[in-house]
Amino acid sequence: MENRQSLAIGAWRGVSFAVAQIDVVAAEDDLLVVGMLEKDVVGAHRGGADAVDHALHGTLFRLREGGIFTGGFGETLMLTRPAAPIRAATLMLIGMGTSLGTNPEAVGSLTGLAMRAALRIGATSVGCLLGWSELDLPDALVAPSAAAMMRGALAAIDAHDTDAFPMHWTFDIRNGAAAHTTAALRETLIAWR
């Protein structure tokens, strides 16, 4: 994993959780999870998906336009050994539908999907950009969305047959509300115990 400034927030059954601002190009994680909306929102930030698309010279845009990966809710696409300059071993795109801004539990469901994939492939380091600026969340939904993401990850771990092998999972906090996001993730993890 690259040298990014991260803050540990706790651990559960072999998975240590942290928060950081993740650079989608420089991240050297085993698995980099990036959410992609079904449609571009004019003037809106697309966050991680936009950075990946730029790094891969418009590949995500072409996949969407060709109907191969549209960004529909729950749709997934795994790219092992993605092309340079992406450094992650595997890139997982997760469709976020048209908008999840008013449905925190939907983001939690997608996070659970990502955790199950990480456990299945044996990832030891994961960067998760599902809640980054893909979603334009009102301030009142930042904490509920972060809490739902943590619940989704924890439920997937608990549903796994055995304790997870050592895994380091980092949630991206580049959403303009880093302190609120971090606090909600940490509080949800503590309450889960």
Image (cartoon, rainbow, N blue to C red):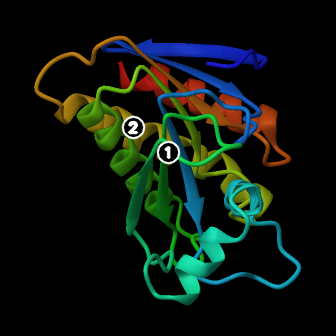
- Is mark 2 in CB contact (under 8 Å) with mark 1? yes
Q: Work out whether residue 101 can be spotted.
A: no
- Residue found at x 73% / y 65%: 57
- Measured as percent of width and height from the top left, residue 18 is found at 61, 21
Per the rendering, the mark at residue 149 is 1
Look at mark 2 in the image and give the residue it sits on: 153
Q: Please, is residue 42 above or below residue 106 in the view?
A: below
Query: In front: 170, or 181?
Result: 170
Question: Outermost residue, left direction?
Answer: 161
**What is the crowding at mark 2: few (fewer than 14 residues within 10 Å), some, or many (at least 20)?**
many
Q: Quadrant of the C terminus?
A: top left
Q: Work out whether residue 82 can be spotted.
A: yes
As drawn, is 101 to the left or to the right of 90? right
- Residue found at x 21% / y 16%: 163
Question: Outermost residue, front direction?
Answer: 84
- Residue found at x 38% / y 69%: 75
Name the residue type under label 1. Answer: Met
**What is the crowding at mark 1: few (fewer than 14 residues within 10 Å), some, or many (at least 20)?**
many
- Residue found at x 74% / y 55%: 55
Q: Please, is residue 81 above or below residue 99 in the view?
A: above
Per the rendering, the mark at residue 117 is none
Name the residue type under label 2. Answer: Ala
Task: Determine whether the residue tagged by mark 2 lies in a helix, strand or loop.
Answer: helix
Task: Determine whether the residue tagged by mark 1 lies in a helix, strand or loop.
Answer: helix
- Measured as percent of width and height from the top left, residue 131 is found at 63, 51
Image quadrant assignment for residue 54: bottom right
